Amino acid sequence: MINPRQLFFIIALTRISALLVLLPVVTAGNALQDAWISVIVATVVAILFVWLGAYLAMKHPGKSLGQFSRDLLGKTGGAITTGLLAISFYVLCLIRTRLVSLVIISHFMPKTPGWALAIPVLLTAFYGAMMGPDTVGRASEFLFTVMALIIVVSMVMSYVWSAERVAGLKPVLSRGLRPVFGAAVPAAFLGLMSGLRVLALGRFTVEEHKMPKATALALLVSGLVLLVVTIDVLTTLGPAQAQAYVMPVLALASSVFIEGILERLDLVLMTAWVLGITFDVTVLLASSSILIGDSLGIGHRKVAAALFLLGVVPVSHRFTDIFVMRQLHSIPVTGIWSAAICVGTLAPVFIAYLIKKRRGGS
Amino acid sequence: MKPRRSFGRIPRPIGTPAEADDNRQDQSELSVDLDENLRTIESILGNASDLAVRRLALPGEPQSSLAVVYLTSLVNTENVSLTVIEPLLSLSDVAYRSAAMAADPLESLRLTLPTVRPISTAGSMKELIDSLLEGKVVMLIDGASGALYFDALRPPTRLFQLPTSETTVIGPQIGLTESVDDNLALIRSRLKHPRLRVEQVIIGRKSRTDVRIIYFEGIAPREVVDELRRRLHEIDIDMILDPGVIRDLITDRPYSPFVMERMTERPDTVAAEVNLGRIALLVEGSPFAMLLPSQFFTLIESAEDYYLNSLSASLLKLLRAFAYILSVLATPIYVAVVNYHFELVPLPLLLNIAATQEGVPFPLPVAAFLTEMVLDVVREAGIRLPRQFGPVVSIFGAIILGQSAIQAGFVPPGLIIVAMMGTICSFAVPRAEKALAYRLVRFPLLLLGSILGFPGITIGSVALVYHVASLKSLGIPYAVLYPPGHTARLAKKLVRTAEHNQPATRPLAPTDKVRRGKVPEPRDPKNGD
């Protein structure tokens, strides 16, 4: 079993890992210097939707979405709503596995084949998923602490906070609200996908009444970290350069040179990111296998094994264009995806729950 | 639910002559005929040369006799005379006669004998033989279908000595010995409390080893004690010589390189850990106690931490943690940096490293593997050799071999420096058996660092974290960084806070809040404020 504190670590760590490298580019690309406002908007929106999910999980202790959606919507309805979220988790799991290998190859190890990095990541994720949610919960305590330390040190080394630099963020909302809200869509989507893991992990969480608070707090804390990172990128590189780089955080870190001690801070940051993204992939694989397993009445370890075998080929294929990954995080793709999750999973289950509650069901 | 595996159950052929004999012996009752009983004992023990039988004629009518039986190799014969024969001879005729006429002569004699030693009754031949083999003195009476045995004597043992595997500069300098009773006395003298529980379990079909479970009732979690008791009772094995054997039989994950039970030969450590809610196992014949359930952070704890002031102890703990991380990661990181991420290194140092790499016949990863293996061999040889030779081999092995290898151009000097540093760091970890096992993990990390650089080491480290997080010791998670309800405990694992600031609750018994009482308030003796 996992406790609410571990749930907090899991969600915060996966959200920071997923967004650390992607967020500045996807937000700066649309909102330019107002990208930091997009981060705030995205965090608020993600908290609202994820709170709904956490509320549902809290009201169905000891059950995952796969189980309580069947109770609320029947076998077919439950399978569809759960399947949508489970497949989303699984697809994200594969995308991120591929992404981590691409980032490493493009930035650090150009001669290494992609599969040589992708398969170990997926294998580690599979091992973590097989060990079960309580192992993932305990591991999150270690990994969150390590990653938080690395990020704090990296940020301190890369940036000396000053009023003049923050002033460089002006003018605020000069291009209106539309680009800000547009840029918030991918960020909100990624937050949503981190937070909604509570629908799978809630089954294994003790003190279920603390779940909504832990989930919302995780999104809030990770939102603050990402806000600092985005402001750091915008004020150091500037909005134009931030959107030009594929991975602006790494570009920012690589500009740091500490004479005689460290020549490439980006490598340290990349290490933290690999650590976090491997954990993120683990939680995605575990969550999708829990949801599918519960929906079909199969043990989640068997499902995890099947998903792992199924994923080996997609993550290992020859992949040369890193910009395709960027397209997957564009506003239209993430917007449609978010809408599908909200309309296809959250809304029907929540409405069914309200109807059942009104009728006096438990 | 997945069925539990059987702990140490060894399949035995049923119906072998030895097994059949054992079964017959188990079943057989003692005869009323003294001679027949003695013949049976001699037969079962194969006319053992150290079997001593002393027959005494009982006074009064009708004339009968008794026999005192023991194994001379296990008992001190002078003590037999003092504690058994003399009390017997001191009994008056009246006492013997009344014992002989009683409904239960054995019980009557047991109550009459003037000795302070506890006397037990054996009803079967198996019980009698077991008692003999445990070093007890058995008394058989003609006409009685039972026997008395005295827990009077014990095998000779060595004197208390320094705990050689856990030396400290300050604090008690006494170690456990091979005698379970002596060890128990050392622990009891430190925990004079009625709730200290000591349970006995006999394990081993042939060794019949005396194992003691020691814990604090009300502090050690009851379900953990029950689980340990169950696992110990389920062990079916021929021989137990050390707690290490028990560890392999009761551990949750026998194939994990991480040792989840803590071994100590210090009675003060046992007392301190039992007071925290852990359970200690003492095994007859071993100077080590096993403490369980153990946790990951005990790796950096030393007995000295209890006796140093909090600041020094904290610094040492942090140093040990750093030393452990370095001992595992130093060589993999060096290989990854030189092979893949040389831009991390400042240019002058990089040029030096590149120059030393010239002419080395092996690729760096291969040289790293060979160096690490040779260092482990040198260390193992140093430990196994007699004390007079051990340091010599270590010094010659490390200095001369290393120097020659560099001069011959077999390995680059940078690698030797890093590998040696890792080895020395491993000695800073107080738990020798754990440090050695944990250092095993550096080989897979070295492999990943050689193939995939930093990302490989990171991915391997995450897998390692999963493995450690999945471990449990007697059902208690082995590695929990933030136990529920104790936010500040992480800091207290890494540092040792002052005594007045120690957590009130014990890690394994959060409901028990009497770990520390009132702490005296410091006052200036001159003006009293």
Image (cartoon, coloured by chain):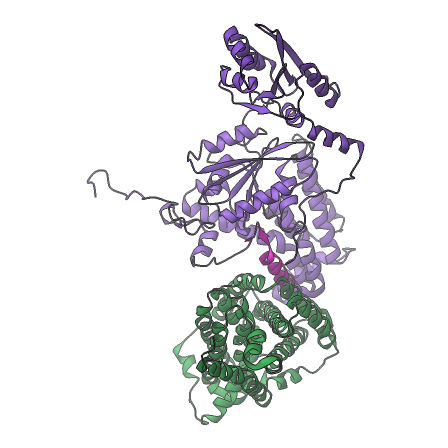
Image vertical order of residue B380 relative to residue A29, above or below: above
* Residue at image coords 70%, 56%: B356
- Describe residue A180's horizontal placement relative to residue B237 as left or right: left
Q: Position of residue B463 (x, y in %)?
A: 64, 61
Q: Does the rendering let one see residue B50? A: no
Q: Position of residue B256 (x, y in %)?
A: 66, 52
Query: Which residue is more in the foreground, B230 or A326?
Result: B230
First to last magenta residue range: B457-478
Q: Does the rendering let one see residue A273? A: yes
Query: Which residue is more in the foreground, B494 or A51?
Result: A51
- Describe residue B351's horizontal placement relative to residue A53 as left or right: right
* Residue at image coords 53%, 16%: B102
- Number of numbered discs on residues: 0
* Residue at image coords 52%, 62%: A141
Q: Give the quadrant of residue B265.
A: top right
**For the stretch drawn in magenta, what is the main secondary structure?**
helix
Q: Position of residue B505 (x, y in %)?
A: 41, 50
Is residue B463 highlighted in magenta?
yes
- Which quadrant: the N terminus of chain B? bottom right
Is residue B469 highlighted in magenta?
yes
Q: Give the quadrant of residue A84.
A: bottom right
Q: Position of residue B199 (x, y in %)?
A: 53, 36
Query: Which residue is more in the foreground, B64 or A65?
Result: B64
Give the color of chain A as drawn: green
Image vertical order of residue B505 relative to residue A33, above or below: above
- Describe residue B481's horizontal placement relative to residue B329 as left or right: left
Query: Which residue is more in the foreground, B116 or B458?
Result: B116
Q: Which chain does purple denote in the image? A: B
Image vertical order of residue A171 relative to residue B122, above or below: below
